[in-house]
Structure formats: structure tokens, C-alpha cells
Image (cartoon, helix red, strand yellow):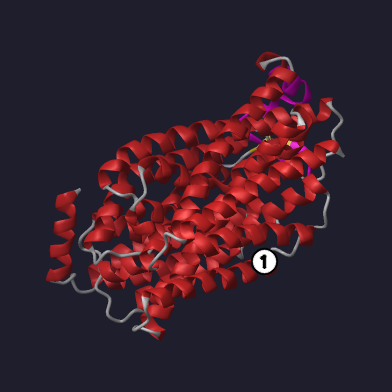
Amino acid sequence: MFSNIITIIIFVLYLSFMLFLGLFFYKKTNNLSDYVLGGRGLGSWVTSLSAQASDMSGWLLMGLPGAAYFTGIDAAWIAIGLFIGTYLNWKFIAKRLRIYTQVSNDSLTMSDFLENRFKDKTKLLRIISSLFILFFFLIYTSAGLVSGAKLFNYVFNIPYVLALTIGAFVIVSYTFLGGFMAVCWTDFFQGLLMFIAIVLVPIAGLITLGGINNTVTEINNINPEILNVFTSFNNETNLYEPISFITIVSSLAWGLGYFGQPHILSRFMAINSPKEIKKARHIAIVWVFISLIAAISIGLIGKIYILNNNIVLPDKEKIFMAMIQSLFNPVVAGLFLAAILAAIMSTADSQLLVTSSALTQDIYYSFINKKASQKQLLWVSRISVMIVAIIAYIIALNPNNSVMDLVSYAWAGFGAAFGPIIILSLFWKRTNSYGALAGILSGGIMTIFWKSLSGGIFDLYELVPGFVFSFVIIIVVSLLTKKPSTEIIDEFNEFSSQC
């Protein structure tokens, strides 16, 4: 009882701090640019940690450790793919996107950029990209809300729906108030807290189990295949079986998703100077590398720790929570459990903000009220946050939703629909609006179609066929249709000269 009270106090203090940041930036948010992109004023530390915190979410502390706990070290293939994707995104996309979005009419959103980049007067690029953003972010945001509900349900033993409601209320509150700067600064603190927790928990577990050698020995005593990166646990046969080439490709392919994630790309667009990108990249890469290794370790160490301590684990995605509550005193446990909440909030808030930006800038301002004042646009954005949150809340009402499944689907959708066009728009001047539109449609639709299939080659992660199909379609359609105008080529050359 005492430990629960301490945990509650820690949570309340933490959530109060998040709301304070929302109120603080509420007074500093004066127009739509401030609300959706922070006036391009982020420093390298805030950019890097907010990008990675919003990227990894509750998936890092729940989904990935749960996968390693259940199937074994083969979950490392996903981690490898994510690390490679993170590095490539920071190395080749971040600086170029930051420069091009400013050169191309100071674009505020991804849809904004695509329309300005290709001088699309039909508005089709803006409409189609906004619709895909809305669709996949509703799924992604609901994954964050499910994570939060599972956390509150497990820690405080409260009903799932009540837990879902509490988490949604807090996330919506500070996003509604403070916009992009509130989201990025909360993500900065949350990224620090996540990092501390995810590093110290496996270390504490190893110490309790007698060190690395003893832990590895105990894992091998259960089944040495747990530590074989080429085998995975099959739930139907209750055996560890060799994983297929398709499974390895599917896992590594998670890295392709980075190039099309609006909530990550918006951080690149918001950094105060392209010169800050290199420093931000170094910080981000170190954070990601250590965090991914720690997440896999939690799942593997937790497999032994749970058995040795006779802990009942109702859901594999709660392995991190179970270890925290068992390993640490109430105060530290409260802080580390708040780190899970931090991971969840850091992604859900970013998704809400990007989705509201799409509704406001790309739909309301572009098609409904071109004469809207900055104050009106600001409030439309805030109302949009509420609307999107309500719909995501309804999707998340099913307690059987898997965080991993929801995230993987949304991740694939964004990666396939937007990854290829972002890459080609930054590196290939021959890309035109016809190719861009065809690529977004083909990537998004292929993802949805492939997801509905199963068995054999169709077990390939939907991101792979979606990304490849979109990439090829953009090139083919661009070459078969007319060349970009002189205005577009001149702007591309201007952007290139600054890279």
C-alpha cells in the first residue's frame, strides 16, 4: 500500500511538471508557425532527444523488451534495422530537409513541403498526403494510448478504460496548450528519463542474477536457442525454430520506415540552424545505440528474473514494469515507471501535433478559410488535437490491442507512403509532381493491401513491398511525364548549393 502511494505521488509530480511546460509555452505561442514548428528555434540537444523520444515511444520500453522476452534474441534484427535507419536518416535526410523546407516557401508541414517543392497547383499532393497522415496517425496515436492504459492498469490496478482516459487527458492537455515547443521540451526531459531507466534496469537485473556469466548460463539451461539470433520461439509448436530469410528481411526493413515519419522529420525541419545537425546526430546515435541494446537485454534478463522470483506476468509487454517494481524501492520505481509514461507521451503528443497540423495548415487553411488569422489557425490546431485524440481514444478502447502490432502497421504506412518521395525529392531533381503523387498513393495503398494478406511470401513486412513499389513508381512515372519546370529546377539548384 505504501509503495503504491509513493508511486502515485511520483506520477502526480511528473505529470504536473509536464502540464507546467504546456502552460509555460502557451504564453510563448503566438502563431501557427510557433505552434506546429516552434519558429524553427530548437537547439541540437532538444532536437536530437525529442526526435528519438518521439520515435521510440512506449514501443522501446514495452514492445521490444516484450518481443525479446517472448521470442529470444532474434528480436535484435529489428533493433539492427532501426539503428541503421536512424543513422541514415540523420546523415542524409536531416540537413537537406531542413534547408529545402526553408528554401521552398518556408514549408511548415510535410504536405506543405511536397506542394511547394513540386509547385503543385492542383492541391492533390497536399490532399492525398494529409489523408494518409490522418489515417496512419490515428492508428499510431491509439498505440500510444494503449501503452499508457496498460501502464496505469498494471501499476495501479485500475480498470483499463479509466486508465486509458487518464493517460489521454494528460497528453492532450499539454499538447493542446503549448504546441510544438511544449512537445519538444517535454520530449527532451522524457528522453533523458527514458535513457536512465532503460540503462539501469538491465544492469540491476544482471547484478541480482549474479552477473553476465551466471545470467547467460541460466538462459542456456532453459534453452540455448534463446540466444541464437537465427531461431525464434513458435507459439503454436512451443519450440524454437529457425527463422526464415523473409523474417530477417522484414525485421531489418523497420529501418526503411524512418525516411517517412512526419513526427521525426518535423524535428529536422525545426532545428535553428543546419549547422546544428551534425552535433544533434551524434547525440541521437549514441542514445539509440545504447537504448536498443538495453531494451533487448531487458527482455532476455527478464526471462530469468521472472522465473527465479516467481512473478506472474499477465502480458509479455509488461516485463519492464514487472522488473522495475521488483528491483527498486518505491521512489526509484515510481521514477522509472514514469519513464514508461514518458516514452508513451513523447510519441503520442508528437503524433497529435503533426495530425492537427495536417488538419489546420493542409485542409482548413488551404481549402476552407484562406483568410484565417494566425489566432484563428492557432485555435483550429488546438481543436484538431482534441478531435484526433477522441478518435484515437475510441480505437484504443479494445484492451486486447497489441502495441507492437499497431505501431508496426502505422510505421509501415508512413515509411512506404512518404519515405521514397522524401528521399527522391531531396536527391533527384528530375522527380515531378506526377511521380510524387503516384508514389504516395502506391506506397500507402500497397501497405494496406499487403497487410490484408498472410502466408508464405505475404508474411513479408508490408513496409518492404510498399517502399519498393513506391520508389519504382516515382521514378517510372517521373520519367514518362514532362520534366519539372525551370522554376522547380532553379529552386532545387539553390537548395543543393547550400547543402
Question: The magenta stretch spans which residues?
Answer: 216-239
223 falls in the magenta region: yes
Residue 143 visible here: yes
Residue at the (37%, 64%) spot, across then down: 110
Using the image, determine if residue 126 lies above or below residue 2. Answer: below
Q: What residue type is disc 1 on?
A: Tyr
- Give the image quarter of residue 161: bottom right
Tag 1 residue: 393
Taking depth in this image into account, of 354 and 380 the one nearest to the observer is: 380
> Where, by quadrant of the figure, is residue 485 drawn?
bottom left
Q: Is residue 58 visible?
A: no
Q: Is residue 360 above or below residue 303?
A: below
**Rendering coords of residue 120 (x, y %):** 27, 76
In screen coordinates, is 374 left or right of 491? right
Q: Secondary structure at mark 1?
A: helix
Identify which residue is drawn at 35% across, 64% down. 108
* Picture coordinates of residue 218, whole percent (x, y): 75, 20
Left/right placement of residue 379 relative to residue 322 reads left
Given residues 439 and 287, the one toward you in this image is 287
Q: How many marks?
A: 1
**Nearer to me, 353 or 377:** 377
Question: Is residue 299 a member of the stretch shown in magenta?
Answer: no
In percent of width and height, residue 465 lies at 47, 58
Q: Residue at x 61, y 54 (%)?
A: 456
Q: Is residue 116 above or below residue 214?
A: below
Residue 77 placed where, x, y %? 55, 38
Q: Identify the residue shown where x is 66% and y is 32%.
A: 298
Task: Report crowding for label 1: few under 14, some 14 to 19, many 20 or more residues within 10 A (C-alpha).
Answer: many
Q: Is residue 425 above or below residue 321?
A: below
